[in-house]
Amino acid sequence: MNFTILTLFPEMFSALLVGGIVKRAVERQYISIEPINIRSFAKDRHRTVDDRPYGGGCGMVMKPEPLAEAIRHAREKHPEAYTLVLTPQGRLFNQQVAQELAGCAGLILVCGRYEGIDERVREDLVDDELSVGDYVLTGGELAAMVVIDAVSRLIPGTLGSERSAQEDSFSTGLLEYPQYTRPKSFEGSNVPEVLLSGDHNAIRRWRRQTSLVRTVLKRPDLLMDQPLTRDDIEFMKKLQQDINTIIGKQSIAS
Ligand code: 9D3
């Protein structure tokens, strides 16, 4: 998978190559990352890429000509690629969108700066718009890196010997169970007995059940459209009964 990034700050993307799975995936040629400076498509002496908004208002808008030239250049080089613009108005990026994008032949990621890009470029040259969440960034670059990171690890081969992308929490639809490593006792707190038992069935059930409890407490929204197993339902009913028993035995203290 090729990621072509159109940006005014191509150097920012070197952060992806400092270390970790994305760097390794590039080295092993599962992915390629190709930042292109939009400014190099500006024709005037000052290499202007922004201009004042029609109708007035504060801030600047990315002017259409250099941006359109940059997108056409990227599309000619990667005719099969899907063109996305990162904007606060975009479709919310999540694991499902990452899965979808991982199926693309390539991605052209357009990073906005200033107050945004000229609407005509978005209408004519962009396939879709993505946001990475409801908070205000200073530009699309960090958002593009979020997309590259999340999509890269879904490309077959990129995770290497690391656990498969199928197993992680947003694929099971639950939050992950707690993890422990040596030592058995750390600052007075011990690793749960069951994990030391060697009983793999018991360990699997404990992990599933702690995942369920965590998800109920921290992200109940994730459970709403999640298929639960017969075992899950039985566990949650038992928990509910236990809670009711405790409540039933209580008299009001205050
Ligand atoms: C003053 C109007 N601003 C709206 C709050 C306009 C604005 C334009 C561009 C504010 C921020 C940005 C820069 N952000 C992005 O380009 C961006 C972004 C984001 O800010 N949040 C979440 N996802 C994304 S994707 C691109």
Image (cartoon, rainbow, N blue to C red):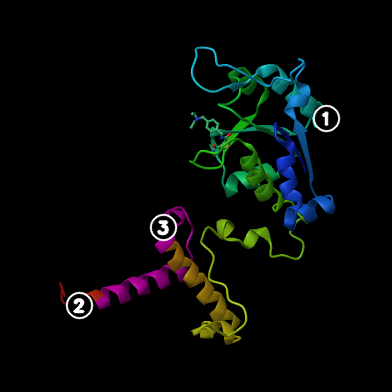
User: In screen coordinates, is 36 left or right of 229?
Assistant: right
Q: Is mark 3 on a helix, strand or loop?
A: helix
Crowding at dot 3, Cα within 10 Å, few <14 / some 14-19 / many 20+, comes out as few
In what element is the residue under mark 1? helix
Question: Tag 2's secondary structure?
Answer: loop
Q: Which of marks 3 and 2 is nearer the N terminus?
A: 3
Check disc 1 and give the amino acid type. Lys
Mark 3 highlights which residue? Answer: 220
- Foreground: 57 or 177? 57
Disc nearest the viewer among 3 and 1: 1
* Labels 3 & 2 near each other (Cβ < 8 A): no
Q: Is mark 3 within 8 Å of ligand 1?
A: no
In-front residue for pair 130/35: 35
**Amino acid type shown at disc 2:** Gln
> Which amino acid lies under the numbered mark 3 shown in the image of this protein?
Pro
Q: In which quarter of the image is residue 168?
A: bottom right
The residue singled out by tag 2 in the image is 250
Looking at the image, can residue 66 be seen?
yes
Quarter of the rendering occupied by the C terminus: bottom left
Q: Is residue 239 magenta?
A: yes
Please provide percent x and percent y for residue 42.
Answer: 75, 20
Alpha-carbon neighbours of circle 2 within 10 Å: few (<14), some, or many (≥20)?
few
Cβ atoms under marks 3 and 1 closer than 8 Å: no
N-terminal label among 3 and 1: 1
Report the side of 93 relative to 232 (left or right): right
Q: Nearer the viewer, residue 25 or 8?
A: 8
Mark closer to the chain start, 2 or 1: 1
